[in-house]
Image (cartoon, grey):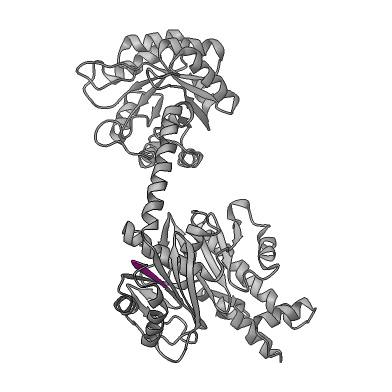
Amino acid sequence: MISALTKIADSLVVSCQPVSGGPLDSPEIVVGFALAALASGAKGLRIEGIDNLKAVRAATMAPIIGLIKRELSGSPIRISPLIEDIEALAAAGADIIAFDATERSRPVDAALLCKAAQRAGMVAMADIATIEEARTAVGFGADVIGTTMAGYTGGPEPDVPDFGLLKAIIPLGRPVIAEGRIRTPEQAQQAMRLGAHAVVVGSAITRPEHITTWFASAIIAAGQAEQAKAAHTSLGIDVGGTKTIVALVEGGMIVDSLETATLRNSGAAAWCDAISEQAHRWRGRFDSAGAAVTGIINNGLWSALNPGTLAVPDGFPLAAELSARLGAPVRCFNDAQAAAWGEHRHGAGNGSDLVFLTISSGIGGGAVINGELATGRGGLAASAGNMRVRRSGQLLRVEDIASGFALAAGARAAGHDVDAKGVFAAAAQGAAWAKPLIEDSRAAISDLLMNIQLLFDPPLIVIGGGIGLAPGFIENLRSRLSSLPAAQRPEIRPAVLGKFAGVIGAADLAQQHTLFHGRIK
């Protein structure tokens, strides 16, 4: 009994249960599935039916969870509902016997099924659907608990595993086998991280009918989404301290664009007028607009984060002002946050969660967590350039050390009137005054990345901006962080959307809101 559980500890168990009556429903094919699973790394099997069990047992001595499925009149219990099922499974060679232990109308009490399995020298596995049923199973002495029935005892069937139930059962002190709708390696890993003794995967491995349906449905849905997207072209806007970009965006692609200088002293209303004039050529071709702007956006209101970049009046109603001029709903975002979404959806992130940093004249950031753009309570989420570090006894913003403005200021202090590009050029030529400035910049960004990884643990950190993408900059960061433990070491990728990241991100967010609502939190 102990040996069977020990053999499957911390491992994959494959449920070889073909669709009943399907073309693969025969003992010979079940044996083939079982042997292929074991050869590929599975340590145990879950087999239904006496004929299938006998055939698999003759082919392997690997641990087998055995069960019989029945259709009973007057009871919804299907998994090994009778004492004779338990006895037959033991005689056929099962090591672990699974039985339905849910609290529903049943022909035989679950406690009696448990005792019958144990009398036969088998491990008794109680398949349950709720934490109360798990407690009851522990109470009557079940050797192991399975989450097999979660989501299948009433109401609509969910599409994802019930990890909340798994987490709740672990403290009860019995081994727990995670089973039910585990369809990806990532879900299997999550189950193990939560404390599962083993993970059972079935349909995703041994039911081609189901797998084919998933892929076919996904392809159809993708086609429908693309058709819907094609009917919704958005306007993308990016207002920065030096330039303004207005573009027509469709499906993450720039259809057409205009770039003009931002007239810094003309004021927010005049900037909106200029955007309206630039967008006039596309009137009637877009049904929503997204604006990415330097500073803070909170519920469509625009305020300066660094007035030295653009002197925005506090709480300027940017969304309302642009919407009135453009004749379309407008969603507004911080430019780095919008760029983070752009890289997530159509750039380096390729759909993955990420933290984005733009390291340029200034430093900005954005984060996509659980597929959602994080904006924060007041629009400040991931304002990386304003995070503080201590240098020489002073508490400084990262932007004051590592940005293009900081490099230029350091150059002036050293007697050289050059911008950030000039600092990099001087360092490349061996100038002693330039190298420490770049070294300080890289050190500050390296510390920032290390802390971001510890704070958010994102799959990716994407680096953009003129400094961030300067030759050798990312490679230097990777080298600095290489000594960290693997679990704490950021995965760094260069941004790929360039100056259009914010435009594409803002337009896509506006389009998502128009199509689906509620994508932004």
Q: Residue 508's image quarter?
A: bottom left
Between 375 and 345, the residue placed more toward the observer is 345
- 473 left or right, relative to 73: right
Q: Position of residue 128 (x, y in %)?
A: 33, 29
Predominant secondary structure, magenta span: strand
Q: Residue 162's image quarter?
A: top left
**Above or below, 47 relative to 177:** above
Between 447 and 228, the residue placed more toward the observer is 228
Q: Which residues are magenta?
A: 287-291
Q: Which residue: 52% across, 20% down?
A: 34
Quarter of the image with the C terminus in it: bottom left
Q: Position of residue 360 (x, y in %)?
A: 58, 76
Q: Which residue: 69% across, 63% down?
A: 475
Between 37 and 265, the residue placed more toward the observer is 265
Q: Position of residue 124 (x, y in %)?
A: 40, 20
Q: Residue 168's image quarter?
A: top left
Residue sitting farthest toward the right: 430
Q: Position of residue 108 (x, y in %)?
A: 26, 16
**Above or below, 37 relative to 227:** above
Q: Which residue: 27% across, 30% down?
A: 153
**Above or below, 288 relative to 487:** below
User: How many numbered discs?
Assistant: 0
Magenta-drawn stretch contains 288: yes
Question: Does the rendering let one see residue 93?
Answer: no
Magenta-drawn stretch contains 170: no
Question: Does the rendering let one see residue 137?
Answer: yes
Residue sitting farthest toward the left: 74
Q: Which residue: 39% across, 11% down?
A: 119
